Amino acid sequence: MDTSVNISAVKNYFTTLQSRIVAALETFDGQTFRTDTWDRPQGGGGITRLIEDGNFFERGGVNFSHVVGDALPASATAQRPELAGRAWEAMGVSLVLHPRNPYCPTSHMNVRCFVATKPGEDAVWWFGGGMDLTPYYGFEEDARHFHRSCKEALTPFGADLHGRYKEWCDRYFFLKHRNEARGIGGIFFDDLNDDGEGGFERCFALTQSVGDSFLVAYLPLLERRKDLPYGERERDFQAYRRGRYVEFNLVWDRGTLFGLQSGGRTESILMSLPPVVKWRYDWHPEPGSAEEKLYTEFLVPRDWV
């Protein structure tokens, strides 16, 4: 393997990040996450950390996975022919948190690394990741805080990165079949390698900065909103909007599709789905309502910083 690719350092960071995030979330919720260690028959495995019916989180998962293989499926190499015939490793931390209180947003974060090797040739590698916010009821100060935290994580690596990765996030987390954003975005990046990005160490450092900033970006929002009273109307709208989350993950999300196509563990891949969801036929929010405000003021991409 190319000596510039330090897989052991990446794995150590990812497992440590998972532990740190889970410890902070357990302190916030007051309940312990379940730990489920698993092996993948084709190679590799992972650690799933899950909470269901917590004091605060209705469902949440913080996953670490490290899967390996001798060859990628044709669906993966069709768009990346340079990967054909290479052994590969994919590892990362992925989390999705679904609070029970509709005034507290769902959030997703992922940091990952992919390496493909072939004897006598340099490794093909890249990092990817990001974080995004899916509110059910919009609060401008929360949106600004989340996006500001994303920008601060990226600024040391280039003044232009936040603008690029925010726009990428807005494009990526978009339900094309609905012509509608999933949430209010954040940052997203993929295929980050040494092509003009400063080599493995710089790309790894950027990925660490994103992972380390998640709790700073998200926990203060929960602290602000966790005690707001809510009723059946708010829960009903939350369940309806969660339906959009499910649609995106099952139809468009690249990580979900890669995991299922590469023989990943289905229980861990689909832990991102919320526990209570509703769909309605041709539903529209009442004019002037808080629900309509989400669509007109928050789901339209804008510069929150």
Image: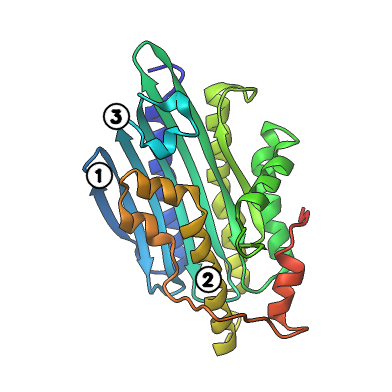
Lower sequence index among marks 3 and 1 = 1
Secondary structure beneath dot 1 equals: loop
Q: Which amino acid does label 2 sit on?
A: Arg
Packing grade of label 3 (10 A; few <14, some 14-19, many >=20) is some
Determine the residue positioned at 64% across, 42% down.
153
How many residues crowd mark 2 within 10 Å: few (<14), some (14–19), many (20+)?
many
Q: Is residue 101 visible?
A: no
Quadrant location of the N terminus in the rendered image: top left
Q: Is residue 86 visible?
A: yes
Residue at the spot of label 2: 242
Amino acid type at circle 1 is Arg
Type of amino acid at the residue the image marks with label 3: Asp
Residue 147 drawn at (x, y percent): 69, 53
- Residue 188 lies, in percent from the top left, at 60, 45
Left or right, 128 with respect to 48, comes to right
Q: Where is residue 233 in the image (x, y as percent from the top left)?
A: 59, 87
* Residue extending farthest top: 120
Seen in the picture, residue 14 relative to 201 is either above or below; the reply is below
Gap in angstroms between the C-alphas marked 1 and 2: 30 Å
Mark 1 = which residue?
40
Q: Which of marks 2 and 3 is nearer the N terminus?
A: 3
